[in-house]
Image (cartoon, rainbow, N blue to C red):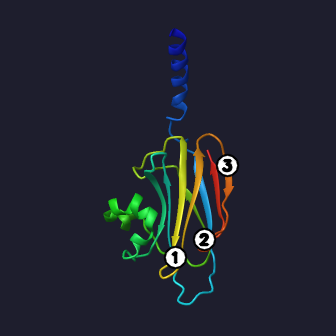
Amino acid sequence: MRITAIALASALSLSPVWASPLPDSATLDVKLELPTLDVANYARPYVAIWLEDSNRDAVANLALWTGNQTDWLKDIRRWWRQFGRYNAEHIDGYSSATRTAGVHSLKWDGTGNDGQRLQQGEYTLYVEVVREHGGRDLVRQRVTLGGDAFAITTQPMAEVGAIELNYQP
């Protein structure tokens, strides 16, 4: 029994590594392409980019490109269910204009929706792209945010091209 207690105490002593916040210098660069589509009545897509923790809680909204069109927010389905419907009164504070076709970049500074640094650990980055009277894509990418840098490129889809993620601790 004593060996088990010592082993448990040793294992628990490792957990503070994941319980520590991201370094102040941590950044995640996101570069995504909104492809040019040859369709009738093309409308600029609505885009939401956010991080969810292992409990599927939306802990950091990186971008919301909807312009002043609030009627279509519910069509960004995953984002709306996880965050939007609970925080509709704050959307004006962080949404920005829709983007034209092309490559767009943003830099995330490691802070969560509460203004505090996120804890090091496992997250899922979501990019949801929806076009009015058009298509819809949802990209999910698991990432480990902590002390190790990484670069990931996702596969292109119909409404969103390849997404490049570059994390620096």
Q: Residue at x 51, y 35 (%)?
A: 20
For this rendering, which residue is in front, 38 or 108? 38
Q: Where's residue 97, x and y in %?
A: 47, 74
Q: Secondary structure at mark 3?
A: strand
Q: Where's residue 92, x and y in %?
A: 37, 68
Q: Which mark is residue 160?
A: 2
- The quadrant the C terminus occupies is top right
Q: Secondary structure at mark 2?
A: loop
Front tag of 2 and 3: 2
Mark 2–mark 3 Cα distance, whole angstroms, equals 21 Å
Inspect the image, locate mark 1, and give the three-letter code of the amino acid beneath it.
Pro
Q: Which mark is residue 119?
A: none
Q: Which mark is residue 150?
A: 3
First of labels 2, 1 by sequence position: 1
Q: Residues within 10 Å of mark 2 (few under 14, many from 20)?
A: many
Task: Examine the rendering and report whether any part of residue 87 can be seen.
Answer: no
Kindly indicate the quadrant of the structure image that contains residue 122.
top right
The residue that disc 1 covers is 45
Inspect the image, locate mark 2, and give the three-letter code of the amino acid beneath it.
Val
